[in-house]
Image (spheres, coloured by chain):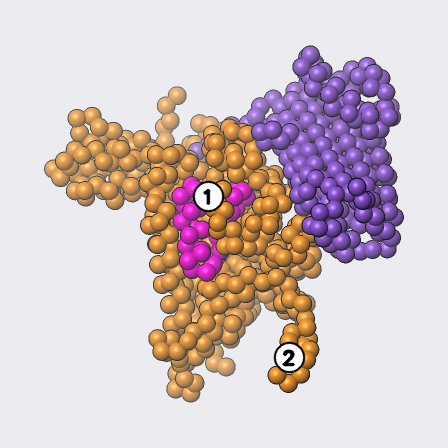
Chain colours: A orange, B purple
Amino acid sequence: MESQLPAEFVVNVDHEKCRKCKRCVINCSFSAIEFKDKVTPNNKQCVACHRCTTLCPESAITITENPLDYRNNYNWTPEIRKNILKQAESGGIILTGMGNPKPYPIYWDHMLIDACQVTNPSIDPLREPMELRTYLGAKPDSLDFEGKNDNVSLKTELAPQVKLDIPIVFAAMSYGAISLNAHKALAMAARRMGTLMNTGEGGLHEDLASYTDRIIVQVASGRFGVTSKYLNNSALVEIKIGQGAKPGIGGHLPGEKVGEDISKTRMIPVGTDALSPAPHHDIYSIEDLSQLIYAIKEATDYKKPVSVKIAAVHNVAAIASGIVRAGADIVMIDGFRGGTGAAPMVIRDNVGIPVELALAAVDDRLRQEGIRNRASIIVGGSIRQSADVVKAIALGADACVIGTAALIAIGCRVCQKCYTGNCAWGIATQKPELVRRLNPEVAADHLCNLLTAWGHEIQEVLGSLGINAIESLRGSRERLRGVGLNQEALDILGIKHAGIGQ
Amino acid sequence: MIIVKIDAKGMHYRPLNKMIREAVAKGEKEFELDNVGGQRYIGDGLNENVKITINGTPGNDLGAFMNGPKIIVNANAQDGIANTMNAGEIIVHGNVGDIIGYGMRGGKLYIKGDAGYRVGIHMKEYKKQIPVIITGGTAGDFFGEYMAGGIMILLGMNGKSPIVGDYVGTGMHGGVMYIRGKVDPYHLGKEVSCLELNDEDMKLISGFLKEYCEYFGFDFNEVMSGQFTKLVPLSHRPYGNLYVY
């Protein structure tokens, strides 16, 4: 039976302007444009990835939302009806990509940053040094020194630290979810900018072997590509327990995406499904987690910090406390808006909590327990702009991760079709003819530009706050004020309402 | 050949394993650990083809991330043996605990006695790396859950019943299990099918079992005289039709 789903988008071709070069036909990876004497759209296939509109030399193509795909109804929205139709036709779980797009409150946009006026001078970052450097890893409870006078040295043995020149790290995205060219771009940019990229759970491709000091290697429940060599060839090791876009569920890279190269990095046969079970079946408790943390520390001779990544869920503060006590050097919290290559829509759109609240709760809890120094906190799950980074650090984060923002910088149009493997921009695809559309050198330049720009912006804000190092902002919630938030949200965030002074 | 002897009595695992790592780095090839009592992570992450004999009961995660060594345990062993192991050999002259061979990708794990729950979960294989787990006694629930590759043989030599617990091979999408005896269908996961062994299967298992019997002194002919059941996944993509795009 032919699907009765109406088209979501309408492709409009201005045939007056069109010179029939067929570039749109060649470029459309979703079969939404054919050539039958003239450029002929197949609206039902269009996902609004904007490849054709961007590349049409005559700007002859526009894409609009189908004006009356579904009769208007505030309750039975087009999306809800589309999903019902799809499931009535298939019986399947609705799969989707990228982060939660629903209009939940965005707490970043309800927090405002302080600035200096008259009584305390601001600093001009154009003329004075501004420090963005951050060290990830466990910090000691106290420092002991030996020697005296001019010959003093540190006696305390420090846990391994990883230096970041900017407190923004590229998020975990596996080779498999994204293309090798995208991975190369992230690795090159991480090296140039003094930050890190993350393999996700897909193993490490041999082409990235020279970037290992800039790479976070992930150990997830499927243990794909995890060997002692993999653990040791890294900046740090991350145990993935959860992901913001799909808390509590596993991963599933379909067999058709497991080609020769992905088979090599994941170390599984070509064409088999790469299933990551929902839990690690050797971790059913904090004690079990501790066992894996120390198994990794033993395998890396205690030279690599070990991070534990969890999704932001209701009880995140207690969980994070357990993670720190289990021996993790870094806790990575991924908020419910975090992206994904593929997740059931019901999970992505309804499970988890905002990272802003999770971060505030975790930082509070670790401080109350006197263990905040024992681990760095990294947050992600929709860090969209430098202001979000500044606010996250003021709430208590050591660093942020960006995934979707990084992909947008290299061409992603947020069409949310990552799971189809047809990404027209060569990012979320393994098809060679699509992958080669993404030039890793150019993409790396774009990523570096983005981080450079955000770095400057963060420095501007620090200057206006009258401080000259990101360290001075960390956990300084007094420099934030809330607008349009109720008292409970203000209390959780640990900030005052705008209009309240010291 | 000099055997490095270490008395592990009362030692924490950290200095013990450091000692082993440093000796391996210096080129030592053979170790004998006496009085081992629960020290975790022995052999963890070692990449060299060394031999470690353990007298006593090693702790959890024995041979985790291991890539080459041969470990002989002259006693029982605990949980998490051969966790994400890539290559090597572990021989246990006794019983073992839970989650052995989790995510194991290569090498051999031979157990004389019983194994606990969750044996060989997400065991996988890659090209010539085909991991093998042979358990001489019985095994608990979730045997071969999510199994993606490799070979598991369960012998039930001690005659205990049932030979294996529930949910055998739930989510299995690769590899093969041979169980010496009948497995009632209600023990099986939904993703598994039961087959009879053909000549190739017999050839395959007799190769491994010959070696196994030599280690533990079992009578090879007696082992082979049992009726084996072969379990394979119904599909390599058990969840392929679960989603709609």
**Residue B187 on image: x %, y %:** 74, 25
Answer left or right for A305 relative to A2.
right
Between the residue at mark 2 and the residue at mark 1, the CA separation in whole angstroms equals 44 Å
Range of residues picked out in magenta: A178-204
Using the image, tell me which numbered label, if any, was put on residue A247.
Answer: none
The image quadrant of residue B89 is top right
Q: How many marks?
A: 2
**Residue A129 on image: x %, y %:** 41, 76
**Residue A124 on image: x %, y %:** 37, 78
Asked whether residue B202 appears in the rendered view, the answer is yes
Q: Chain of mark 2?
A: A
**Residue A240 on image: x %, y %:** 59, 48
Farthest residue, direction front: B1
Q: In percent of the image, x 17 and y 26: which residue is there? A: A37
Circle 2 SS class: loop
Circle 1 SS class: helix
Asked whether B15 falls inside the magenta stretch, the response is no
Q: Amino acid at mark 2?
A: Val
Using the image, tell me which numbered label, if any, was put on residue A152.
Answer: 2
- Graded by Cα atoms within 10 Å as few (under 14), some (14 to 19) or many (20 or more), the crowding at tag 2 reads few
On screen, residue A128 above or below B245: below
Q: In percent of the image, x 56 and y 33: which residue is there? A: A268
Q: In percent of the image, x 60 and y 48: which residue is there? A: A231
On screen, residue A36 above or below B22: above
Foreground of the two, B37 or A145: A145
- In this figure, which residue is indicated by the disc labeled 1? A207
Q: In percent of the image, x 24 and y 42: which residue is there? A: A55
